[in-house]
Amino acid sequence: MAARVVCISRTLGAGGEEVARLVADGLGFRFVDDEIILRAAEVAGVSPETVAQAESTPSLITRIVEGLGKAPLADPGMAVLHPMPTAPSYTKLIENVIRQTAEDGSVVIVAHGASIPLANTAGVLRILVTASPEVRASRVVEAGGGDAKAAKKAVEDSDRERGKFLQRFYGINHEHPTHYDLTINTDNLDAAQASALVVLAARA
């Protein structure tokens, strides 16, 4: 059955966002990334400017969901939750937004660990776009991310924070290939080639 939803997870420097945009174009799907948090922020009464300023920090989602816990949800289909200090509580808020976005169909969802809560959901294709740390660091340098040493640290820090996010939100202590339907290594594939593979899989 052809996929109605494509979830794309990516590591820093792997080119996952470019791949995702090409996949969305190729399938004629909507591209969604920041919208997941922005929709949650809107419910919480957090300004887009505040989100934009905070989104590059590891605490972004924590700040947003803490605000969500204090605000009633406008959508009657989403459970109203009150102030919540623990990760298992506020995770459900982000999951609700992800699930609602997926229910709309014809969408490519990038990041936010969307592949995890949507596992075993009919019509969902889960993709991981990654590459070797060396290649990823070199791409960070090319993108203006400092020298080789700084880029290597950026990749390591990003991987560590990504691991913490998966553990904190979804209880994933170790990410495995089986969390995804397809894992793409972009060491030797460009974005067009990688996206073509995803489009082919989505149409199968």
Image: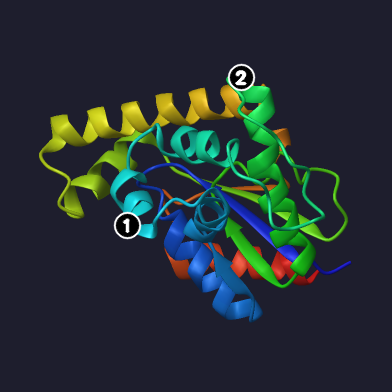
Closest to the observer, 68 or 60: 68
Q: Is residue 5 left or right of residue 56?
A: right
- Above or below 141: residue 179: above
Query: What residue appears at the point 80 percent right and 56 percent down from the top-left corner?
Result: 76
Q: Is residue 194 left or right of residue 51?
A: right
* Residue 189 visible at all: no
Q: Which residue is mark 2?
A: 86
- Label 1: few (<14), some or many (≥20) within 10 Å? few
Colouring chosen for the image of the structure:
rainbow
Closest to the observer, 44 or 29: 44
Query: What residue appears at the point 66 percent right and 70 percent down from the top-left corner?
Result: 199
Among numbered discs 2 and 1, the one appearing first in the sequence: 1
Amino acid type of the residue that numbered disc 2 sits on in the rendered structure: Thr
- Above or below 42: residue 96: above
Closest to the observer, 74 or 41: 74
- Above or below 168: residue 33: below
Q: Could you say whether the residue bearing mark 2 is in a helix, strand or loop?
A: loop
What is the number of the mark on residue 49? 1
Q: Is residue 88 left or right of residue 184?
A: right
Estimate the x, y position of residue 63 in percent, counting from the top left.
44, 35
